[in-house]
Image (cartoon, grey):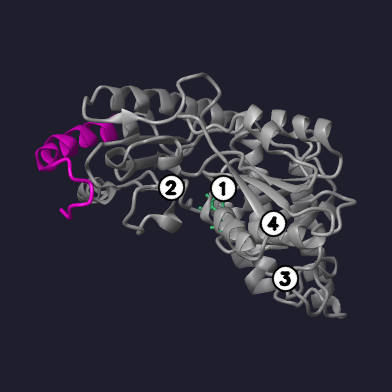
Amino acid sequence: MLYLDYAATTPPYDEVIDAVAEVMKQHYGNPSSLHRMGVVAEQLVSQARAVIASSLSCQPVEIRFTSGGTESNNWAIQATARRFRQRGNHLITTAVEHASVYETFRELERQGFRVTYLPVDATGAVKLEELDKALSDDTILVSIMAVNNEIGRIQPISAIGELLRQRSRTIVFHVDAVQAIGKVPLHPGKLKIDLLSCSAHKLRGPKGSGFLYVRKGLELPPLMYGGGQEGGLRSGTENVPSLVGMAKAIRMAVEEQDRFHAHTHLLRKQLAAAIRDIPELRLSGSDAEGEMAPHIVHFCFPGMKSEVLVHALEEADIYVSSRSACSSSANKPSRVLKAMGFDDARAISGIRVSYSLSQTIDDINYFGEQLQKAVARLKHTITGQPNQRR
Ligand SMILES: Cc1ncc(COP(=O)(O)O)c(C=O)c1O
């Protein structure tokens, strides 16, 4: 079995599973209870917050726990729009965001906000000139992802942060860092980020757990009303086992980040070479050093629906994605690939391969061999009609 779908989700670290189980068995008190069991649970929540804050070089009070990336993105964007509507009605994002960002902006458009979806170049990158052009006096929010979940393109977050601060002190800068934390260095303070979303299950933590970094001084309206947890911003009894597991996963991921980077960088080179060797395939993204996340490789098999190749590889017990897991069943050309200027034949055929420290060069070589065989078997079935069912 070869699991190469780490951008969809990851197997939790053993240490995370042990920590979650230990808290579930031993420390099941409610952090809001006044007795000792509650106090212990509350201490675990505080420790988890402190560990995450130190991994991001920020303050514990800036970490607000959520149920994952989708919730963090929804909260960041909707709350900012609501809070600053008096100041302006214009929001900026990109055409290649994850659905949890993109669909939130679509909803805000229905509510009357003006939204600019910045175009990207053929490698998937936002151009600073386009952002500069789009900014206006009534812009209140810019939301741009750090690493694209479909093709792995790294966006120029540092330069975007600089540009925004030069242009205005009040525009809120949100970064969806779900695919970036633990993979590429990210310190919200240094990068002039106001809001940053993270999800634990992408970095070997538990599912259904994440956080939103909210820069101190930025006051957002609550996401949920109730018992006043999370400083009154997100009520609901804390998911203590999961928070403890997430903190452990983030600490481990950040500690091994350099090793992760060096290793996955090698795997990426090997995999890119294997893909280039198969004439029917087209590698996506940039060839320039440092512009692609090392743990995601994307390619197209023009004219061949992604799902066909996904299932052909599955027969060899190899697991990859057609695109982001949340939209992989949508039987349409990929919105992200279309935004990069790909034609329909290419945009229906994207395959994402993603991996971590656990995979080896041998795994990648084996994948290359199986891919070559699958392509050789399938290439005769291409008719050039992207919409025809096969
Ligand atoms: C870039 C990005 N943002 C947000 C999400 C959503 O995260 P979650 O699955 O924790 O809701 C994902 C998950 O695929 C993602 O890749």
Q: Is residue 278 above or below residue 34?
A: above
Residue 21, quarter of the rendered image = bottom right
Q: Name the residue under label 1.
A: 203
- At numbered mark 3, what does the secondary structure look like: helix, strand or loop? loop
Residue type, mark 1 in image: Leu
Please report whichever mark, 4 or 2, sits nearer to the chain's N-terminal start. 4
Residue 108's place in the image compared with 161, above or below, is below
> Does ligand 1 reach within 8 Å of label 4's beta carbon?
no
Q: Residue at x 37, y 36 (%)?
A: 342
User: Which residue in the protein does label 4 denote?
Assistant: 77
Label 1 and label 3: CA atoms lie apart by 20 Å
Disc 4 marks a residue whose amino acid type is: Ile
> Could you tell me how far apart the alpha carbons at marks 1 and 2 are, in whole angstroms?
25 Å
Q: Are there few (<14), some (14-19), or many (20+) residues within 10 Å of tag 3?
A: many
**Mark before the other along the chain sequence, 1 or 2:** 1
Of discs 1 and 4, which sits in the foreground?
A: 4
Question: Which residue is at 33% across, 32% downward?
Answer: 364
Q: Does the magenta stretch include residue 20?
A: no
